[in-house]
Image: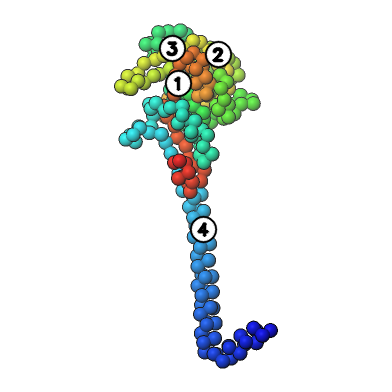
Amino acid sequence: MFIFRTAVENIRRHKRKSILFFMACLLLSLIMQVFLINLQVTEREYLEIRRSIPVTGRVTNLTGTSSSRLVISEKNIAAIENCDFLKDKLYQAPVWFTNHEIDSKDVRMNNSYYGLATNSAEATSYKEITWLEGENEKSLSGEELKIIVSKQLLEAENTSLGKDLDLYIHYQHCDAYDVISYDFSKKHTFRIIGLYTANDNEQDRQGADILVPYKAITALHKQEGRRYLMDGASFSLVDPAEINAVKK
């Protein structure tokens, strides 16, 4: 009570100073209120920008002029695969298939099919895929010998969705001097789990007849003592604000 009475007496004794002090406190309070409102608005705008401006990444060569036909190490693919800050991860590498055994030098001849070892159907421009019952996009993430094929291949091989197809693998290899050669692999049996069709005027930007899980192709090559690496990889950030964490 003594302190309260003393404070009241001081206010009465110094009215002008007390009024000025009160006005200063009120002004400061208003300034802080405006500052907090602006901070909240800025925070909302920041969150909106993070949601509306996607940040994507792609593995390229040192000059940034090429994003395919690279030799991407397993370590780098594993780093992308295990990074929780990334989504829409896409890996791919070319694979040549034939329905009979031939010399690898003749892989581009008749009865050969160009394929992509990948983890997503996004590797092609075809979006309409007819899936075998029980199969879906996630099937490309495993190691099972499953394939998605074009309608043209299905007709050429006189087979159908859900059937097995025996194919030989010829891996396109590019050495340090960009000289292309083909490694031959023995025959393997693949299950047809999907079919994609294009309109007459629609071209697949990758020109692929077959999509096969990249983990399956990698596993096959490891079994045979061969080295198989991705030649293209891309991704996007879950949260663009975490770009520094992704770099680390």
Identity, as a three-letter code, of the amino acid under mark 1: Tyr
- Give the class, few, some or many, for how many residues have Cα within 10 Å of label 1's Cα (few <14, many ≥20): many
In this rendering, the label closer to the viewer, 2 or 1: 1
Question: Which is more foreground, mark 3 or mark 2?
Answer: 3
First in sequence: mark 4 or mark 2?
Answer: 4
Secondary-structure class at tag 1 = loop
Farthest residue in the front direction?
Answer: 2
Instruction: Compare marks 2 and 1 and give the one earlier in the sequence.
Output: 2
Q: Quadrant of residue 65?
A: top left
Q: Which residue is mark 3?
A: 184
The first of marks 3 and 2 along the sequence is 3
Which residue in the structure is indicated by mark 2?
Answer: 189
Q: Secondary structure at mark 3?
A: strand
Residue 136 % position (x, y): 59, 29
Residue annotated with mark 4: 43
* Three-letter amino acid code at the position of disc 2: Thr
